[in-house]
Image (cartoon, rainbow, N blue to C red):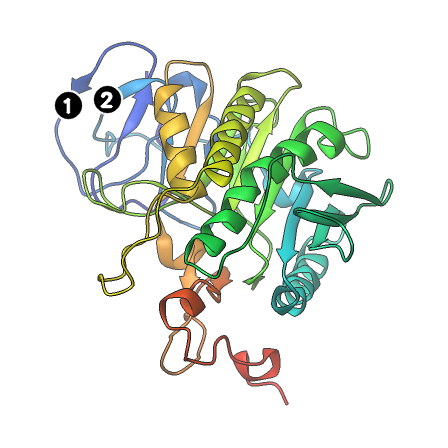
Amino acid sequence: MLIWGSVQYAQRPRCILEGGESENGTSDNKCCLGAVDDGCISGGGADHDTVTGAIASHQPPRSLAPRSYTMHKKIDELPAVLTSFAYREEYFPELEGMLATVRRHHPTWHLVTGKGPVSGVNGAAFEVESPQRNCRWTLPVPFELDGSVNDWMRIVWMKAWWMAQVWDQFGSLGSIPINRVIWLDADARLNGPLDILLEPEKEVVAGVWGGAEGTEDDHMLSGFLVLQGSKAGVVESIINEWSTRCLALIRNPPPPPDPRATWHWGGGDQEVLTTVLSEMKRLQFTLCKLMDYDKYCGEADHETGLPKQGALIDQWQMSRRVRKPHKKWPPPEWARYGKS
């Protein structure tokens, strides 16, 4: 039995359920709350896609009344740990700007943050701040920047290892009954409280999905992630596998692309995570695909420097410095929102 809620729909839904594949028609909707095992939906009328097993597509019956989601809670009503890091000094003000918006909209959440590199320490090290204690973490593999595009890739691959550390050491900070860790890129900004709905005891991976099935953007985006689960549960195994694979890439990165080639993004931490999720799709967890890209990944206009209208999360994309190293980006904090 599928249950359909009062959520804005667009395009065709894809809901991965336990069992075999089936196709039951098409629709102008994009919202599937996985059978009786749904774990995550997006609030505020946002499009989403929830996945919990093998693929099946369904059209919601128009005659059904909206369901009251008594099992779900808005994420801003739940205790959580939000984490991020800044590696290299140019990211430090980005991190502080992001944290200011989190404190404004989620004042009760616990923050675990890191800054690196650490002077006098070989390899990649971070000074870590948390409400519980401050400490230092050092990446367990060699880390040498060489000035190539792989410098950027090495830094983003560190995200998976970082998330594994936070999950293990701070995931239940403040006696949270289940680990609930949220990643937000240092160059992101919140324009309001996050509004996705979770079943608080489910194993859940939630994030923005890049594009339509079968396109090169058909993968998870990792600028905003919600990871929820029990210790030694399925989500923890996903995080650990993600970390292991990204550490292997840091240790032995592929050759950097020809600088004359057309820019093509790929092979970063988010593509690795997508592969891990696909390989583990038979396990019991909910994959919540947030399909409203402009709402949850609002790319600022690269020409005007203005934020995306209507975005809940602004993404100022420091990655653009890799693609266009001679362009000054991002704008100063005061200029982004018209503040003097």
Residue type for callout 2:
Ala
Q: Is residue 119 left or right of residue 217?
A: right
Residue furthest top in the image: 19
Residue furthest right in the image: 133
The residue shown at (29%, 44%) is 9
Residue 325 got which mark? none
Residue type for callout 1:
Asn
The residue shown at (52%, 80%) is 331
Residue 65, given in percent of the width and then of the height, sits at 35, 32
Kind of element beneath mark 1: loop
For label 2, the residue is 56
Kind of element beneath mark 2: strand
Residue 143, given in percent of the width and then of the height, sits at 58, 45
Task: Select label 2 or label 1 by which is in front.
Answer: 2
Residue 24 got which mark? 1
The residue shown at (55%, 31%) is 72
Q: Please tell me whether residue 292 is drawn above or below residue 253 in the rendered image.
A: below
Residue 237, given in percent of the width and then of the height, sits at 54, 20
Q: Please tell me whether residue 52 is drawn above or below residue 190 in the rendered image.
A: above
Q: Is residue 216 left or right of residue 163?
A: left
Dividing the picture into quadrants, the one containing residue 177 is: top right
In contact (CB < 8 Å): disc 2 and disc 1:
yes
Between the C-alphas of marks 2 and 1, the distance is 8 Å
Quadrant showing the N terminus:
top left
The residue shown at (55%, 79%) is 337
Q: Please tell me whether residue 53 is drawn above or below residue 325 in the rendered image.
A: above
